[in-house]
């Protein structure tokens, strides 16, 4: 399923991304202290990320021995700011993502991401409650 997720992200296909998420997925943002629980809010956040990141590409993939833990290293831009990051994914027994943690660097990238996502958050909340 990680292959499906990566392919969906690289294709910038929000419906295909959402299809890889478990209903009970927990999303941990690099710029928010509190995790977000559930597929609707996680899918809406990821749609917001698609709107914010430019020139997004995965550059490396690491897989755990059990096949359920994965790390996808990425590069992107937010305006003039270069972003390096990693998506840490855990798959449930059905192969769906049930834990999703994002880390970004450097600090300027985290700050740019926080500002860009804050500008998206009203739309993200609307999308999460509409579905």
Image: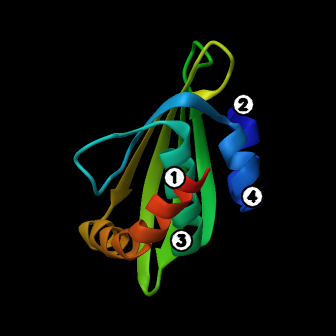
User: What residue is disc 3 on?
Assistant: 53
Q: Position of residue 93 (x, y in %)?
A: 63, 12
Mark number displayed over residue 129: 1
Q: Dot 2: what SS? A: loop
Q: Residue at x 32, y 53 (%)?
A: 30
Dot 4 or dot 1: first in sequence order is 4
Query: Which sits in the foreground, 69 or 100?
Result: 100
Q: CA distance from mark 2 to mark 4?
A: 15 Å
User: What residue is disc 2 on?
Assistant: 1
Q: CA distance from mark 3 to mark 1?
A: 23 Å
Label tally = 4
Query: Which sits in the foreground, 87 or 124?
Result: 124
31 relative to 98 in the view: left or right: left
Q: Position of residue 100 (x, y in %)?
A: 47, 37
Mark number displayed over residue 6: none
User: What residue is disc 4 on?
Assistant: 13
68 relative to 124 in the view: left or right: right
Q: CA distance from mark 4 to mark 1?
A: 20 Å
Q: Residue at x 33, y 75 (%)?
A: 112
Q: Position of residue 76 (x, y in %)?
A: 53, 69
Query: Which sits in the foreground, 74 or 126?
Result: 126
The part of the image, by quadrant, that contains residue 74 is: bottom right
Question: What is the crowding at mark 4: few (fewer than 14 residues within 10 Å), some, or many (at least 20)?
Answer: some
């Amino acid at each position: 399923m990680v292959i499906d997720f990566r392919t969906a992200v690289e294709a910038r296909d929000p419906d295909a991304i959402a299809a890889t998420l478990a209903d009970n997925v927990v999303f941990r943002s690099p710029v928010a202290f509190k995790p977000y629980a559930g597929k609707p809010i996680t899918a809406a956040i990821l749609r917001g990320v698609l709107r914010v990141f430019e020139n997004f590409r995965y550059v490396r993939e690491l897989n755990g021995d059990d096949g359920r833990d994965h790390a996808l290293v990425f590069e992107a831009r937010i305006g003039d700011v270069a972003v390096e990051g990693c998506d840490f994914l855990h798959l449930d027994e059905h192969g769906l993502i049930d834990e999703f943690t994002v880390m970004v660097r450097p600090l300027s990238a985290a700050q740019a991401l926080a500002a860009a996502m804050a500008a998206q958050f009203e739309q993200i909340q609307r999308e999460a409650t509409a579905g």
